[in-house]
Image (tube, grey):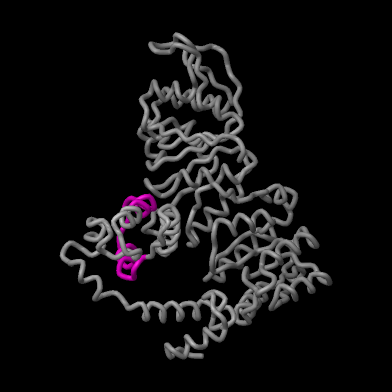
Amino acid sequence: MEDPSTINILVVDDDASTRDLLSEVLTEEGFRVVTSGSAEEALEIGRHESFAVIISDMRLGPNLNGLDVLRAYKAIQSESEVILITAFGSMETAIEAVKAGAFDYLSKPFKLEEVVLVVGRALENRSLIAENRNLKRQLGAQGHMETLVGRTPAMLEIYKKIAMIADLRSTVLITGESGTGKELVAKAIHYNSRRSKEPFVAVNCGALTESLLESELFGHVRGSFTGAFENKRGILEEASGGVVFLDEVSEMSQGLQVKLLRAIEAQEVRRVGGSQAIHIDVRFIAATNRPLDDLVRQKTFREDLYYRLKVVEIDLPPLRDRSEDIPLLIEHFLKRLSDERGQAHAVSPEALGALVSYGWPGNVRELENALESAVAVNRTGVLTPEDLPPKLLRDALGDSQRADDLYADLPSLEELKKRYVTYVLRLSDANKAKASDILGVSRRTLYNILEKYKLPC
């Protein structure tokens, strides 16, 4: 890396304490640091001075934001690397940021050593700017695509990886427990790629017998087996140009594993009973909830196929490891269920407490099913613990605790509001402008709330 003293870094944040902290840390690393409190000021500075790295908060004010800073600097200083920081990450914003050319996308609260590390990687990446330009995704969220939901750092990393690999031909292996959303990830990769208008075909390798799965994947010729009355194109032929998603790939027999490896490597198939090689153009995405490396050691899964599938690997965390996302997922699923039924549904604080406390062995799929069950039996529009599946409620409370005990341990709605406002103030370092923006209220309303709850003004 070049001499740090020759490297200019711009820090853009409307919160003075964050600006000063980042400036101090990066200056200690030897860099020359310039700071700006608004997007408008940052763009004006960029007309007169060049920067190797720009670090910008996403939310900067009512007019321009971090994405505007990113796009502007990519237009006027194309070799600059831009790092965006946000307290509220989503797949859409992560994809939009990568599409616009962001080098990285960090979530608050961040660790200072992480920022220094990312800046170092950004500087190293400048020497590979030509390759980096090829990684700028031309991505657009598709209206019909099911949505991944979550704002935890683990999910943010997954969004970034989806954005970066969407247009590659590389095979992808998605791992994670049952119900974590592996097919949603596969669809997100497909629908954000150049193949998005071509077929996406999902196959459950564990749901079909070996002979039926072989015929479904590769097709067959007339007379190749009893009942084969005509030639049949297989899924790999039908999906040519698009993506084939192989769910539960660990359940595929070793005989079929050999044929699949050939199809991936040579991009050609032979129908069952046929001798003609048929060219295909398919991107393969596989998923498993079993550790394939263990199956390789047990000699039940081919090592060569394993390494061919995991060119890119995405590991989905279980819901219990990202419990902060549960309220967001609940909101997402209830909105969809409310739209389907034409009646708005909300969740009471007591029911929310039970849903957050539960361990979710079935992950996101179990949460979705539990909410659908609760909505089906609810008549008031507000879900209470009594609407939840009994086993869920028992496990959330513990076998020795009755449902009524839940109410005694939960804070009131007013207390939850007070805690949330306190949390937002802490997150925004007591910046009232940023706090009111996060809360979605006016500055005057925020001061009224602070006075009501006797919080420091």
Residue at left 24%, top 59%? 395
- In depth, the one of 31 and 180 nearer the eye is 180
In x, y percent, where is residue 387? 27, 60
The answer to whether residue 357 is magenta is yes
Residue at image coords 69%, 56%: 101
Magenta residues, as a range? 347-369
Q: How many marks?
A: 0
- Is 377 on the left-hand or right-hand side of 445? left
Q: Percent from the top left, x then y, of residue 236?
A: 53, 27
Q: Quadrant of residue 127?
A: bottom right
Q: Residue furthest top?
A: 223
> Within the image, what quadrant is residue 75 found in?
bottom right
Secondary structure mostly taken by the magenta-highlighted segment of the chain? helix
Looking at the image, can residue 31 be seen?
no
Residue at image point 42% right, 22% down:
255
Q: Position of residue 134 (x, y in %)?
A: 71, 47
* Camera-nearest residue between 133 and 117: 133
Q: Residue at x 48, y 90 (%)?
A: 456
Q: Which residue sits furthest right?
A: 48
- Which residue appears farthest toward the left when viewing the image? 400
Residue 171 appears anywhere in the view: yes
Q: Is residue 297 magenta?
A: no
Q: Quadrant of residue 31?
A: bottom right
